[in-house]
Image (cartoon, rainbow, N blue to C red):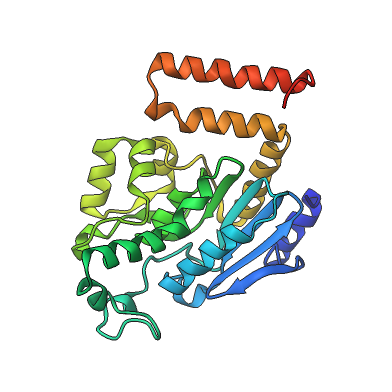
Amino acid sequence: MASPEHDLDPVREGRDPVDDIPHILDKDGVRLTVDDAVATVTLTNPAKRNAQSPALWRALTEAGRLLPGSVRVVLLRAEGKSFSAGLDRQAFTPEGFDGEPSFLDLARGSDAELDATIAGYQEAFTWWRRRDLVSIAAVQGHAIGAGFQLALACDLRVVADDVQFAMRETSLGLVPDLAGTHPLVGLVGYGRALEMCLTGRFVTAEEAVNTGLANLAVPRDQLDAAAHDLASAILAAPRDAVIETKALLQGVQDRTYDEQRAAERQSQSRRLRDLAGLGD
């Protein structure tokens, strides 16, 4: 990974911090760059506040598939004042997006077709929690609806002090369907998650940190640097230990206390044998 000076200078100069790194993917509002063990996925349509569309979701899915095996940490960030204002309202018009079925057309399809289409959309939000990666969302400004769910897709969230999360799907007669409900309940609990979704109210940086929705809040001009500092701290630990620890914590909700203790023993046995040179 580049030195801290390399990472921070572009931020101070007002340039995108990944401008000088070759792009692996750059289309439909998504750019992927890789610098050694760190990949950066950037939303690149600030003029529309990084509003989301099926094309953007396909690009996000492609970014996940293009990650080299050397990547250990993925940073998700966005250009402009807002992380993502959510689904592009054009989706709700009769014509929808060019070359795409409108939502009205989707509703007229069979149950199987509709389910398969939504499952395809969800793929853009699921790969961020792969056990061999740690994903960090750097979130500023508005993160609404699909934008909120994209931030929730990551393992960790660093937010700017101007962040405003909101889950607005219910107010539109819809439900959050982009894999965001499970992590939201896991982070803030059922009662608070239900209240957030049903009211669609804004959640500030202070509340996000206090409820566990965000790991850290910083001034807006320090957001990229804070996310890179967190990535560097994660990279300081051996990769296999990070993978085992993430797997242990991800499985907690599906295990009893005794099952979790057994999983700890099994994981530690693998680590000890590996450190002793006795692994497979």
Drawn side of residue 49 relative to residue 202, left or right = right
Residue at figure coordinates x 63%, y 61% from the top left? 66
Residue 12, horizontal then vertical, whole percent: 71, 61
90, above or below 49, in the image: below
Drawn side of residue 196 relative to residue 98, left or right = left
Q: How many marks?
A: 0
249, above or below 164, in the image: above
Residue 75, horizontal then vertical, whole percent: 61, 53
Q: Residue furthest front?
A: 280
**Depth order, front residue of 98/223:** 98
197, above or below 191, in the image: below
Which of the image's four quarters has the C terminus? top right
Residue at figure coordinates x 60%, y 29% from the top left? 244
Drawn side of residue 275 relative to residue 132, left or right = right
**Depth order, front residue of 63/2:** 63
Q: Residue 22 falls in which quadrant of the image?
A: bottom right
Residue at figure coordinates x 29%, y 61% from the top left? 115
Residue 190, horizontal then vertical, whole percent: 27, 37
Residue 191, horizontal then vertical, whole percent: 24, 37
